[in-house]
């Protein structure tokens, strides 16, 4: 699939817009248009229903060790600064960046790629920030300019075998920056904290400094005791939360895949340490199945277990659900969701202070004075089982999904080009967004074939009936019906209802299926229930 075609459709049909576009846009921020906001809302509602409100707490789900409960939270975006010091974000939530002394531009160190190139005994590492698959044109142009060659002499250049990330190149003096004309203009890499700082109230300096949250998880951990004390939940149970998070990415890229403002759908699942491995396996499998049930192709999905050298120092295991986004090179996958076995790291950190690995164990990090470097709350966040009277710090399994990345994956999956007959029966190419009916922004569109003979009045009654049942419907009486079908195909509408001349004689209408193109006659009085049944 051509990613440029999808981006164009998203703008044309109102799925996604560049933030502040009339002022030139703001990199790393995106606005959801009328169709996009419905698509994303449907995705979040499907997640919340399937994970929280629709969960059967009285039965043991297939693959689960036992029955469990689910509850929800909605925590603030700005939290006490100590939360981020104890969690490790204040010290460790960093990417490495390099600056170009010539162009005055900044780049994320691991996203700069390039190839070695030689000409007439002179050698340089030609870099680019172009997306994978589009590097050749940029690196060739940069090399020709650097070596002062015309295009017809491009075959005189001798290239290295493959593109390499900048961290694999030790000779920075031989590197030609992405926007530079001379070698050696890139600085040594240095850390860049990804949290957005802000100020609380009128206080200045460190006293009033706070941060926009980089994740939703910590709000759940610091409220663990509140949830236990205010409800009757018993371990094992999960706390779910959806909400905005913010990361000051150095170089956001790939449409909405890597943004500075994004929305998360996270669960922190608290369980007994002895059964945590079983729960980790359960949540890996369940979350993978959720995506395939909603229409993501299993051929473009993979569940990848992290290698030991990828794991955080506290992790007992992490797996990523990954999708083959079309902007990635063939065979490569991008993360949709991470499922992490976090042990008791988070609750213990908020009790005792920032934890670090030492001699294979987690210990509180001490400062030069021998005291905890970042103090915990001192509150007891352990759990006591009211049946066995056992006291323990629960282990946590964390399925953490991105609502924006999920929306992007379903947009990519839905984009299809095929052929369909027009109003004259002639086959024509069309673009159709084949969303799962649960996710489709518009559930049904209603058309009167012509704007006379009482057809609009019948169509409007059907439209209102759909609306009264909470279904997102669209009414359109403008243009040839074939063009109206095409517009709804691009919007991903699964069903189109046409009121025609036959409706006046037998009180039936045509329901057209988006994917099969099958058209069936249904009684006017049965249209709403028919659409509801099909959506189920």
Image: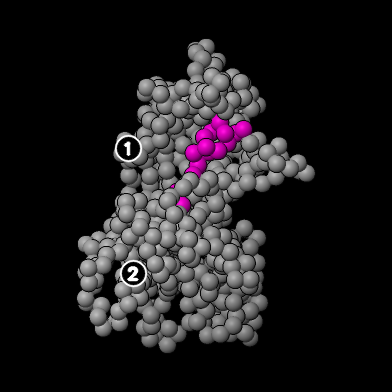
Extent of the magenta region? 82-97
Taking depth in this image into account, of 19 and 225 the one nearest to the observer is 19
Quick one: SS at disc 2?
helix
Relative to 239, does residue 261 appear above or below in the rendering?
Answer: below
- Name the disc covering residue 441, or none: none
Whether residue 471 is visible to the viewer of this picture, yes or no, is yes
Position in image of residue 83 (x %, y %): 60, 34
Taking depth in this image into account, of 483 and 384 the one nearest to the observer is 384
Is residue 93 on the magenta stretch?
yes
Quarter of the image where one finds residue 503: bottom right
Is residue 398 on the magenta stretch?
no
* Residue occupying image coordinates x 48% and y 72%: 9
Q: How is the image coloured?
A: one colour
What's the magenta bit mostly, secondary-structure-wise?
Answer: helix
Left or right, 429 with respect to 454, comes to left
Q: Which residue is mark 1?
A: 309
Q: Residue furthest top?
A: 389
* Residue occupying image coordinates x 52% and y 37%: 91
Position in image of residue 52 (x %, y %): 54, 40
Q: Which residue is mark 2?
A: 139
Taking depth in this image into account, of 268 and 378 the one nearest to the observer is 378
């Amino acid at each position: 699939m051509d990613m440029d075609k999808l981006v164009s459709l998203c703008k044309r049909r109102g799925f996604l817009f560049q933030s502040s576009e009339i002022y030139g846009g703001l990199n790393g921020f995106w606005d959801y248009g009328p169709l996009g906001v419905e698509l994303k809302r449907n995705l979040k509602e499907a997640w919340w229903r399937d994970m929280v409100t629709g969960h059967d707490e009285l039965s043991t789900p297939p693959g689960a060790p036992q029955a469990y409960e689910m509850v929800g939270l909605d925590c603030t975006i700005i939290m006490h600064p100590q939360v981020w010091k104890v969690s490790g974000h204040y010290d460790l939530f960093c990417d490495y960046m390099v600056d170009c002394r010539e162009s005055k531009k900044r780049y994320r160190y691991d996203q700069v790629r390039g190839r070695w190139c030689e000409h007439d005994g002179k050698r340089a590492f030609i870099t680019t920030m172009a997306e994978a698959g589009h590097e050749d044109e940029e690196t060739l142009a940069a090399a020709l300019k650097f070596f002062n060659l015309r295009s017809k002499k491009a075959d005189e250049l001798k290239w290295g075998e493959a593109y390499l990330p900048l961290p694999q190149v030790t000779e920075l003096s031989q590197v030609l920056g992405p926007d530079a004309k001379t070698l050696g203009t890139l600085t040594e890499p240095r850390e860049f904290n990804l949290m957005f700082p802000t100020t609380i109230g009128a206080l200045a300096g460190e006293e009033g400094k706070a941060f926009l949250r980089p994740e939703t998880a910590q709000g759940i951990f610091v409220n663990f005791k509140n949830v236990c004390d205010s409800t009757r939940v018993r371990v094992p149970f999960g706390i779910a939360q959806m909400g905005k998070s913010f990361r000051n990415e150095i170089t956001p890229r790939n449409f909405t895949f890597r943004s500075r403002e994004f929305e998360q759908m996270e669960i922190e699942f608290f369980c007994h340490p002895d059964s945590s491995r079983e729960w980790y396996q359960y949540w890996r499998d369940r979350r993978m199945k959720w995506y395939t049930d909603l229409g993501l192709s299993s051929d473009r999905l993979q569940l990848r277990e992290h290698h030991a050298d990828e794991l955080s120092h506290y992790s007992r295991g992490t797996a990523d659900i990954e999708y083959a986004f079309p902007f990635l090179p063939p065979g490569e996958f991008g993360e949709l969701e991470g499922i992490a076995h976090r042990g008791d790291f988070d609750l213990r950190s908020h009790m005792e202070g920032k934890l670090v690995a030492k001699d294979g164990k987690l210990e509180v990090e001490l400062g030069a004075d021998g005291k905890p470097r970042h103090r915990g709350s001192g509150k007891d966040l352990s759990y006591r089982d009211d049946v066995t009277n056992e006291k323990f710090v629960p282990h946590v399994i964390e399925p953490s999904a991105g609502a924006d990345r999920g929306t992007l994956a379903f947009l990519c999956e839905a984009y299809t080009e095929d052929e369909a007959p027009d109003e004259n029966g002639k086959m024509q190419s069309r673009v159709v967004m084949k969303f799962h009916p649960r996710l489709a922004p518009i559930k049904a569109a209603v058309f009167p074939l012509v704007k006379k003979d009482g057809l609009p009045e019948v169509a409007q009654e059907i439209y209102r009936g759909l609306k009264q049942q909470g279904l997102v419907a669209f009414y359109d009486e403008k243009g040839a019906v074939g063009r109206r079908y095409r517009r709804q195909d691009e919007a991903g509408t699964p069903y189109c209802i046409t009121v025609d001349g036959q409706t006046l004689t037998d009180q039936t209408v045509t329901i057209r299926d988006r994917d099969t193109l099958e058209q069936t006659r249904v009684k006017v009085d049965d249209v709403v229930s028919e659409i509801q049944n099909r959506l189920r």
